[in-house]
Image: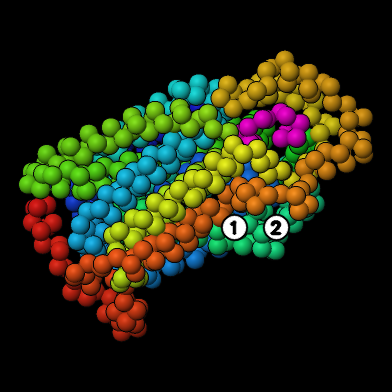
Amino acid sequence: MFGITDYFVFFCTIGVSFGIGIFFAIWERKKNTPVNYFLAGRNSKTWPVALSFIVTFQSSLMVLGYPAEGYAYGIGIAYNVLGTSIAFIFSAFFIVPVFHPLKLTSVNEYFKLRYGNNSVRYMTLIAGILFSLFYMAIVMVGTCVALEVVLGIPFWGTILIYTIVTTIYTAVGGIKAVIWTDVFQLIVMVTGMIAVLVKSTEGAGGVESVFKNAKDRIGSTSFVFDPTVRYQMWNSTFGLFSAYLYFTLMQPAMQRVYSTPTVQSARNLYFISTPFFCAFQLMASFEGITIFGYFVGKRCDILEAGIIDNINAILPFAVLDLFQNIPGLAGLFTASLSSAALSTMSSCLSSLSAVTYEDIIKVKFPNMPAFRATQLSKMIVLMYGLIALGLAFGVSAIPGSVVSIFVSFMGCFDGPLVATFLLSIMFRRATAKGVITGAICGSVIVFWINIGNRFSGVPPYPYLPPGPTDQCDAYLKPGYQNISDSFIHPLSLNMTPTSFTQSLTSMTSTEASSSTTTTSIMSYSIPKDTGSSSILEKIYSISYQVLSLVGMVTTLVISATVSLCTRPPKSIDERCLFSFRKHILENNCCKKAELNEDTGLEEDTKFME
């Protein structure tokens, strides 16, 4: 269980993050303008910004969700690295050279320049705000469930701690505090992930034992195209392309793009972050494999035995078991999980404040003094922190892995929004009516599939064949009793301590016999298509990894069709359109990366000064 050293490591992480925010609040007090508060003066160094970008999207969705998915469903989720790489490189070449020279603060300002009105701007603003708020809520829920398991702090208590700490240091320190706190938190996160990988592999008996014990998980990926399979190469690679591309278009990412001085430095941000981000995805995926191999070696599949009934608790339980005799390492894991949550929340809060100020307040009050604008932006951070706090308690009632919950429901937003950006950038004939109509239709279709999946009676996708459970009674010994009890969580578990004990004591070696094992494996095998499934059932069974792509493709088709049937804008700002000659040939081959495109900055600069 947690000792003094573990608590010290955990609280030091939170203390350092808080201290960085206070430091920058004092250090930057004389530069109290929106452009410095939101964009660090547009002169940030590439490496810190790239590392900050990496950790911004490595929340508990990755730290908790990827190991849980790897444990239950196999290594197929690791193919997400291909979709991630394609999305990040695509953004570096096709998105950054269009957006960076515009010298914006909010990414939504682009649509005012592109269409000459605010209709699309406000649509993307509202959708982006909803996306970020639910993103923060899901991140907090996953993190706080894990911390209740590990620390024993009540669920509501950890949510309050994270919300208060993150909101305060983001509000007072601005984007510089967020960036440098992210750099510190990245170091903590990576150290914690490596510790789990090494210790679980060692506990399983080495790399060979892991591959032997977890061969079902490692060899589980299908290469046959079937959108109803949870993880297969095509779904995991191209299905999430649009989801990860939206990460590069979100305000937190664009704030980092805008905070760099040149187009090339902004591109380098993605070139640097891509291999690191993919490496961390692979590490998190393989954590699930090594943990499964570890528990198979102990002949106790904790998920099959019912020792944990919440898939998101697999990693926290493993950490307590792995590091129970090593002071500080359980605290290190908790610190890494905390760092993931804090970084995501701080980036989202900063971005929400930026878009609210730039797209709403500044539009209504264009002559507001810079000092007052900065103070108001800090109050907006506090407001969004409270809203995210309330949403977290609502999201906590939704069952399932935090990864699947997030990707499936957020597909209602990210796929259609990506299509809106792409059409606006690449398709000259795109119209405001067209992209709005397409985005609404794409969102409605993905939402319908989500509702059908949740409430139509379609059975949940089965886990892979379980491991042995005949030695699980070892967790009833005095040294393990507290670990088991700590997993009784009122929001996610249905098992009482008494039923938990009875279920374990009732498991005998007879129940681990061949017949029982065969029945268990059959119940967990992937169901075969008997031809009796209706078309609707097949649609509702689509893998959550494909939903974002469905939203993007639907929006692209409908938006393009409606745009061709409606009147285009009378005049188009050419800076808002992608040009292969200008943005690829000239920027990369002719070394004309920094063209004189400062038009549009004059008003903003005058205001900031």
Residue 428 left/right relative to 196: left
What label sits on residue 387 in the rendered view? none
The residue located at (92%, 39%) in the rendering is 514
The residue located at (8%, 56%) in the rendering is 606
Q: Which residues are magenta?
A: 302-316
Q: Specify whether residue 248 is in view.
A: no
Is disc 2 surrounded by few (<14), some (14 to 19) or many (20+) residues within 10 Å?
A: many
- Residue linked to disc 2: 221
Per the image, label 1 sits on a secondary structure element best described as helix
Who is closer to the viewer here, 468 or 362? 362
- Residue linked to disc 1: 236
The image shows residue 66, relative to residue 590, as above or below, that is above
Alpha carbon of mark 2 to alpha carbon of mark 1: how far?
10 Å
Q: Classify residue 437 by image quadrant.
A: bottom left
Return the disc, 2 or 1, that comes first in the chain's sequence: 2
Q: Residue reaching furthest front?
A: 565
Per the image, label 2 sits on a secondary structure element best described as loop
Three-letter code, disc 2: Thr
Q: Mark 1 and mark 2 in contact (Cβ < 8 Å)?
A: yes
The image shows residue 403, relative to residue 300, as above or below, that is below
Residue 564 left/right relative to 237: left
Q: Specify whether residue 581 is in view.
A: yes
